[in-house]
Amino acid sequence: MKKIIKTQNAPAPIGPYNQAISVNNMLYVSGQIAINPESGNLIQDNLVEETTMVMKNLSAILNEAGISFKNVVKATIFLKDMSFFKIVNEVYGSYFEGDFPARETVAVAGLPLGVNVEISVIAYLND
């Protein structure tokens, strides 16, 4: 059975989609960008802060589903410029302990609201 996951601790969708959907013991989290859910402000001036906000938004959605980054099995990172890879990778990696998920990182021509980074994840739900 499909269940919509949403929290006010992550930004509301900016289009016709949900923050996350759980189905068949899996959680599919939509791509998150660096919108501060408390202020609604977009963080773009500092790549470390921007990536940290993205990861906090992902964490809030995972937490709403009752899980954490330990449950993530797949991640996709979209970058405005591949020169951002090292910095984004360092911030992203700090949110995992040991076993990292499968992942791809791609540079794209543009991202929503002109952001530098967007990240989506797939995770399993606890039994």
Image (tube, rainbow, N blue to C red):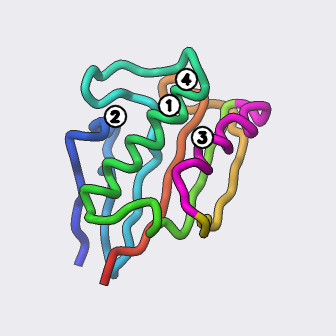
Task: Answer left or right for 8 relative to 75.
Answer: left
| Image spot of residue 20 (x, y percent) | 33, 57
| Image spot of residue 63 (x, y percent) | 29, 56
* Residue 94 included in the magenta stretch of the image: yes
Task: Give the quadrant of residue 125.
Answer: bottom left
Give the residue displayed 68% in from the left and 44% down from the top: 89
In front of the other: label 3 or label 1? 3
Residue type, numbered disc 2: Ile
Give the residue displayed 57% in from the left and 58% down from the top: 75
- State which region is magenta: 81-97
Task: Give the quadrant of residue 38.
Answer: top left
8 shown above or below 69: above
The residue that mark 1 highlights is 112
Q: Main secondary structure of the magenta part?
A: helix
Q: Mark 2 or mark 1: which comes first in sequence?
A: 2
Residue type, numbered disc 3: Val
Residues tagged 2 and 1 counted as in contact (Cβ below 8 A): yes
- For label 4, the crowd category at 10 Å Cα-Cα, with few meaning under 14, some 14 to 19 and many 20 or more, is few
Give the residue displayed 48% in from the left and 24% down from the top: 113
* Residue 32 included in the magenta stretch of the image: no
112 shown above or below 127: above
In front of the other: label 4 or label 3? 3
The residue that mark 4 highlights is 114
* The label number, if any, that marks residue 91 in the structure image: 3
Query: What separation in Å lies between label 3 and label 2 (alpha carbons)?
Result: 24 Å
Give the residue displayed 62% in from the left and 50% down from the top: 93
Residue type, numbered disc 4: Gly
Query: What separation in Å lies between label 2 and label 1 (alpha carbons)?
Result: 9 Å
Q: Mark 4 or mark 2: which comes first in sequence?
A: 2
The residue that mark 2 highlights is 14
